[in-house]
Structure formats: structure tokens, C-alpha cells
Image: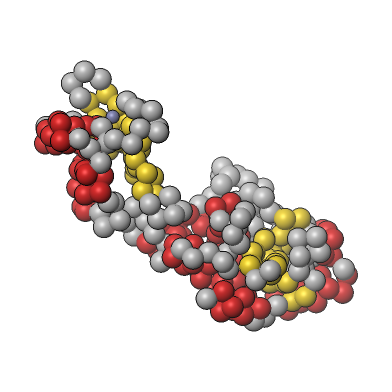
Amino acid sequence: MVMLLSAETLPVNQFLNMATARDRKAGDKLYKEGRATLLRADGHNATLRVDDGQQTHECVFQLLPTRQVSAACTCTPAYTWSFCQHRVAAVLALHDYLAEHPPSMWRAVLEEATRPTTRRGVAASQAAIVFNLDVTHGNWSVVPYTLAARYIPPGTRRDRDSLVDFIQQKGLQREARPLSQRVSPNAYPQVAPEAIAAANLALTANNSYSGYYGYGSSSNTSSRSLDDTILALLSHCVVFSGSAAEPLQQRCGCAARRANSNSS
Ligand SMILES: [Zn+2]
């Protein structure tokens, strides 16, 4: 499962134990007086404002890829271990909010994956999106590539087999460019929604995990489930295997599945 910030995953007691008795009492009072207000929250981050009667401070809670939750307050330097009264009030208020508004896992995954990155009115591209599965030293990573419309005959774009044949026959591997930014479904109306979602999730995963670990070696459950989501989506996409230097060499049908089972 992709992990989200929720009433269950917010380690309230652990945080409260990090406060001195004095701050805990003061924070509890601020909380009961309703001085902690939620400013914004999504599946991974939450920001609250706390008015301690003298000043207002902002407390930011963040779900890290390690599944831990970090908590920072503008009143103290980031390295201070002890938990201030603002964070005590904020974590209690945030817990109430999350208990009343449990996050929806699938909505979060799909919103994140298909969120348009460009404004409306973006020119629709007829380019294709294909994927390269790179398996090196037992780790694997997926890199989405785009192939400009001018290389692809119109009838080929929606048919995966013809697209694969065409790329291989014409040696178009060199013309494909790795995607570096999230793509909007509006910008690629010819591309299946699964491919848009897979491309955006792969970019997210590449940024968060594979710098050091690759997906396959990751032992943490949240990235595991991201792997599984990407692999499930890839079954609807055009996937090749290859290296970063020589991508898109061979079509892979079941390679993604194999790479996944090797890693577990
Ligand atoms: Zn504080």
C-alpha cells in the first residue's frame, strides 16, 4: 500500500513523549482552546498554525519515504530534539482532523498520477510514450520515453504491437527522449491513461528512491507498493528493456513481472 498521513500513521504518543512535561501541558491547553488551526493537508504533508498568545507559529508534518513522520515548528531550529508546545497542540489537532477526514488511498494515488501539470489550453501532442525497463545488478528501474509525433504514422499510435514493430524496424530508439517532467493527460490525448499514470509514478519513484537503491532492492513497503502499482500499469503500456545508454532494445512482455519476483 502507498502510505498516507492518517490518524493511524501519525505517531501521536511518540511525539508527545518527546515533549517536556511543561510543554506537553502548555500544548494541551493550546489545543483545548482551539489555538491550533489546520492550514492545509494532503496525503503526505500537513501544515498547522498555532497561536500561543504571544506569537503564531507554523508546524509542518511530513510523511517521509522511510514511513516516519517528521514534525517541524518555526519556533525552534530544525535540529532541536525536544518537542515544543506548538507541535504538541498541532499534533493533537491534526489527529482530530485526520480521524474525521481519513485519506482515500486510491484517490490520492490517481490524483497524484494524473494531476495535470500544465495549464488548460496546452497544445495536444501526438507523441507516443514508451517505457524502458533497466535491470542492472538485480535492481530495476523504469524510465518513460517520449517519441515525437513526426516519427510515428497516425495509424500506429494506438496499437501497441504496430508501435513496437515500427520502432524496431525503423531503429527509432535513438530518437526517443527520456521524460523528465510529469505529463498531463491533456497534452497526450492519444496516450492511454495507464501510460500517463505509469510515467508520472515512475518519475516520482525515480526521484524518491532509485538514486541509490533502485526499486527492486527497496525493502520499504510504501515504495514496494509503488513498484506494484507501476508494474500493474505497465501491463497496458509499450515496454522495452535496455540500459540507460542503450534504451528500448527489446520488447519485454513479462520482464517486468520477472524483475519484480526476483526482488522479493
Ligand atoms: Zn514551536
Name which residue lies at 84% across and 60% down.
174
Picture layout, residue 242 above or below residue 205: below
On the question of residue 27 being in view, the answer is no
Display colour scheme? secondary structure
Q: Nearer the viewer, residue 138 or 125?
A: 138
Measured from the top left, where is residue 44 in percent x and y? Answer: 39, 49
Measured from the top left, where is residue 78 in percent x and y? Answer: 40, 32
Name which residue lies at 26% across and 57% down.
8
Name which residue lies at 63% across and 67% down.
139
Measured from the top left, where is residue 43 in percent x and y? Answer: 38, 52
Snapshot quadrant of residue 53: top left
Q: Nearer the viewer, residue 262 or 169?
A: 262
Picture layout, residue 116 above or below residue 59: below
Horizontal side, residue 164 vs residue 13: left or right: right
Name which residue lies at 30% across and 56% down.
9
Picture layout, residue 131 above or below residue 68: below
Horizontal side, residue 22 vs residue 47: left or right: left
Q: How many tags in the picture? A: 0
Measured from the top left, where is residue 196 in percent x and y? Answer: 59, 61
Snapshot quadrant of residue 4: bottom left
Indicate the quadrant containing the N terminus: top left, top right, bottom left or bottom right.
bottom left
Q: Nearer the viewer, residue 127 or 45?
A: 45
User: Which quadrant of the picture is home to ligand 1?
Assistant: top left
Q: Residue furthest right?
A: 170
